[in-house]
Amino acid sequence: SQQGEEDPQALSIQEGENATMNCSYKTSINNLQWYRQNSGRGLVHLILIRSNEREKHSGRLRVTLDTSKKSSSLLITASRAADTASYFCATDSQGAQKLVFGQGTRLTINP
Amino acid sequence: GAGVSQTPSNKVTEKGKYVELRCDPISGHTALYWYRQSLGQGPEFLIYFQGTGAADDSGLPNDRFFAVRPEGSVSTLKIQRTERGDSAVYLCASSATSRTGELFFGEGSRLTVL
């Protein structure tokens, strides 16, 4: 079963614009991670945010976490054509040691 | 390379046949995960190994699916009596920690059951 749900399912923007993707989950978590997947490839880890953190930055990525709303957002600033990919959030529920992935957001950056 | 290696990258088989998919994790990674991904969907958890033992196999869909990791390194996912619905990309990932941290994924094995 999927724990996280990403929103929107698909997003298409112009190069240079910012892209925001959201993730909601159902149970209490230890941490939340975001991964990227290029078409036909494996997933690549982007960033991890712990349940006691509210915001984290990594280069052009900004992740927020609101445990009261059980939601997270991933912001990619100054998007590039190479950012075109699917983005997944993944959570590990407290007491479990497996990552559960959402359905993903397909991001298309138009040159 | 030093990444997670999966073989074969593509496997086409007939309904009812037996299939083995292999995963070679990053050296020294104690945790190993198998996921299944259908087109347009997120990865679906199958099984998690910590060392040689299956710590959580709650995602295996039925008893046709089995996975082993006899020496705590390479893992094999075994599917008996394959069905067309088993067609998917099977992803393997490894992690250095016993607590859930960053997963390193392989490129996947695409299984097509005709």
Image (tube, grey):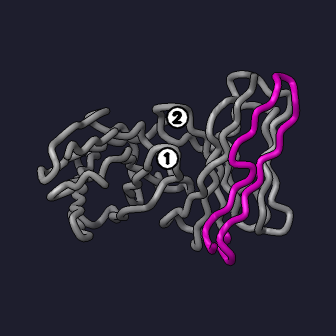
Q: Quadrant of residue B61?
A: top right
Write down the region rendered in magenta. B1-30
Q: Earlier in the sequence, mark 1 or mark 2?
A: 2
Quadrant location of the C terminus of chain B?
top right
Q: The residue marked by circle 2 belongs to what chain?
A: A
The answer to whether mark 1 and mark 2 are in CB contact below 8 A is yes
Label 2 sits on residue: A1
Q: Position of residue B69 (x, y in %)?
A: 80, 60
The answer to whether residue A101 is left or right of residue A34 is right
- SS of the residue under disc 1: strand
Q: Quadrant of residue B51?
A: bottom right
- The mark found on residue A100 in the picture is 1
**Residue drawn at 21 percent across, 65 percent down:** A60
Task: Check the image and name the residue furthest to the front.
Answer: A111
**Residue drawn at 78 percent across, 63 percent down:** B74
Q: The residue marked by circle 1 belongs to what chain?
A: A
Q: Residues within 10 Å of mark 2 (few under 14, many from 20)?
A: few
**Image height of A99 relative to B32, above or below:** above
Marks 1/2: CA distance? Answer: 8 Å
The answer to whether residue A15 is left or right of residue B20 is left
**Residue drawn at 82 percent across, 32 percent down:** B64
Instruction: Let me know if residue B84 is in the magenta part.
Output: no
